[in-house]
Amino acid sequence: MSTFRPPTGTTGLTLQLMGNAGDVWFDSLQLVEDGGVVIPVELIRNGDFADNSDHWIANRPVGSSVTFSDNECQANLGGSIEQEIAVTPGQTYDFSIDAMTPTEGHGFAMFHIAPGNTPQIELRGGGGWDNYTSSLTIPAGVTEITLEVIGTTFLVVDNLSLKSAPVPTINQNRPHRTHTYRPSQENRTMSNANARKAARQESAERFFQGSIGSENFKADFRKHELKNNFWLAEGAMKIPPTETSRQVVIFKYPTTTDSGRYQLEKDSDEHQLAVILMTINETPLPAYQAHRGTVEFFHNSDDHTVTGALDVYLMDVNNQELRVQMLFSLDRTTRRRPTRVNTVQPR
């Protein structure tokens, strides 16, 4: 074991391991304080964007943008950044991110850990800089994960950090960011969406999930299809009493409406937007349409995938206002053509 004392004012260092001849092997390196406390190592490279886009992969679907400037990254209208991170199976990590949502936009930080295991943090604040924190435990057998940050509408991020827990409080001297934000559950959604490494694979598993009132909703069936110049993004969940009973949420938007953020109470008539909640296999068929709230979505005009969020209110059968919150990411549904069977008549 060797010791050293950094000069006053030191904020970083580089450890270099070398051999003079032959094969030299290194293992079990740790940086430990005088009191025996292991200093957590930062796993996210260039998390403060001091080196602009170094170590980050930027994804820019048609109509989106990703920019790096002033030690910050801005992702808009479906643009995203990602980085692969080496991790230790069974280890718990603490994650932190500063985010600003100009014009009341929002986005997500997503950890692609394994198929069916993609924790998300919704980044939605009041327009200024907010700090979001979370923790995640790596399953057995997983040695690499991908962190993806996506701007559903408009999102600026900085100071991304992932360290082994427990992590001491990070004191970044940024006087223009004066507070740490701990969003309530209604403003921050933690989910375990069924997704894969979207940017590393040709396709991703999609999801449609959230809550209806106090009840969780996770679609068993999902569709995104075009009908009469309207796109229908639909999630259906099985419910009692029968196997064919379904609770269905539909987001309806015309092909002429641009991706973005809309308020139903003032934009629904002009842009012909609608959020519908219905129950199938009951008599009579109950269907309710949201009368107020916010919808945000990004429609990719190349492959007609759609991602977005719904936070709306409707009146139920008891004339009580019911809140519906949903996150969705859907591929275009392709209709299967019937198989043509050629029969040969015996001679």
Image (cartoon, grey):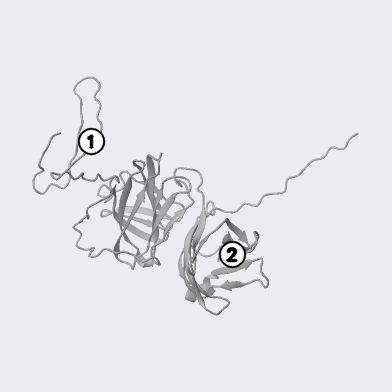
Viewer-side residue, 79 vs 18: 18
The residue where tag 1 is placed is 29
Name the residue at the bottom extreme: 319
Mark earlier in primary sequence (2, 1) = 1
Q: Is residue 320 above or below residue 161?
A: below
Q: Residue at x 50, y 43 (%)?
A: 202
The image quadrant where one finds the N terminus is: top left
Q: Are marks 2 and 1 in contact (CB under 8 Å)?
A: no
Q: Residue at x 16, y 43 (%)?
A: 36
Q: Which x, y percent locates residue 290?
A: 53, 73
What whole-number distance in Å separates the C-alpha atoms at marks 2 and 1? 54 Å
Answer with the quarter of the image where residue 141 lies.
top left
Residue 224 visible here: yes
Q: Which x, y percent locates residue 268?
A: 52, 73
The residue where tag 2 is placed is 247
Q: Is residue 28 above or below residue 129?
A: above
Q: Is residue 241 above or below residue 13?
A: below
Q: Residue at x 30, y 66 (%)?
A: 128
Name the residue at the top extreme: 22
Viewer-side residue, 143 vs 64: 143
Residue type pointed to by label 1:
Leu
The image quadrant where one finds the C terminus is: top right
Answer with the quarter of the image where residue 30 lies.
top left
Q: Which element type, helix, strand or loop, lies under badge 1?
A: loop
Crowd band around label 2 with a 10 angstrom C-alpha radius: few (<14), some (14–19), many (20+): some
